[in-house]
Image (cartoon, rainbow, N blue to C red):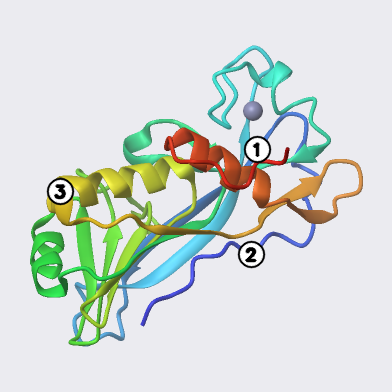
Amino acid sequence: MKQKSYPVFPDQIQASHDVDGGFLCFWTYWRPDPDDDDPEMPGLKQQMFTYIPALSHEPCLCGSKKVYGRCCRPQRYWRTICPNLAWQGYSVLESQTAVYHGVDGRRVREQLMDEIQLQCVEDTSRRAFWILWGDPALKSEYGIMCFGDIELQDNQTLLVTAMSRSRMAALSRILKKLMGKQLPQPDMDYDPVTVIDKRTGKHYALPIDTRKESFSIKHGRKNVNRKT
Ligand SMILES: [Zn+2]
């Protein structure tokens, strides 16, 4: 069964975490489950936050291409990042799902099974589930790093989940490469982005509408969310 990938934020910021000197980074790993029928099959997901220091004059780890001292360091709230596919830097954590309706499930299943960047971890008649490892897959002591997942439901709906725009773009590129014109336009769903107030340590969610708007603009669609 699909395991939800929403991050659980730490209750407290540890004293060792300087909010003006680095980022919280969210990692997802998969590793084999020793209790599983097939101990080689990655069946356990592990997620964790680590602290990554940042220097003022260096490019900001949020991926903005500005330097940290002029980007995330002066912000009131603390943003969380996650690594991009293939060690291509980091991006701001923005959990999102793309839903593709009415796909040709049998064909899609074969195409996804053949894709070297994906690993199938569940395959039943009702549901198949792949995780994006990239090529080569990146191993660590916690398991193999995971950059998103694809679920095929009832042989007709694809559910693509990613923790950042960059990861979603990587998954979309893979699907486009495999399916070409068969690929329908997805319905996008965004989870609230949680940030941490640097002074109070309180968590709060950023408004979703502003993020939807910029996604529409980026993809050249008519923007229905813009306020006039
Ligand atoms: Zn930044």
Closest to the camera, between mark 3 and mark 1, is: 3
Image quarter in which the N terminus is found: bottom left
Give the residue at x 60% y 24%. Answer: 60
Q: Secondary structure at mark 3?
A: helix
Query: Could you tell me the amino acid type at mark 3?
Result: Gly
Q: Position of residue 84 (x, y in %)?
A: 41, 39
Give the residue at x 43% y 75%. Answer: 3
- Looking at marks 3 and 1 on the same chain, the residue that comes earlier in the sequence is marked by 1
Label ID, residue 63: none
Up-down relation of residue 195 to residue 34 (above or below): above
Up-down relation of residue 171 to residue 6 (above or below): above
Residue located beneath label 2 in the image: 8
Query: Is the residue under label 1 in contact with that under label 3 (CB below 8 Å)?
Result: no
Residue located beneath label 1 in the image: 23
- Looking at marks 1 and 2 on the same chain, the residue that comes earlier in the sequence is marked by 2
Label ID, residue 180: 3
Alpha carbon separation for disc pair 3 and 2: 36 Å
Query: Could you tell me the amino acid type at mark 2?
Result: Val
Give the residue at x 12% y 64%. Answer: 113
- Judged left or right of residue 223, residue 108 is left
Q: Secondary structure at mark 2?
A: loop
Q: Position of residue 171 (x, y in %)?
A: 31, 49
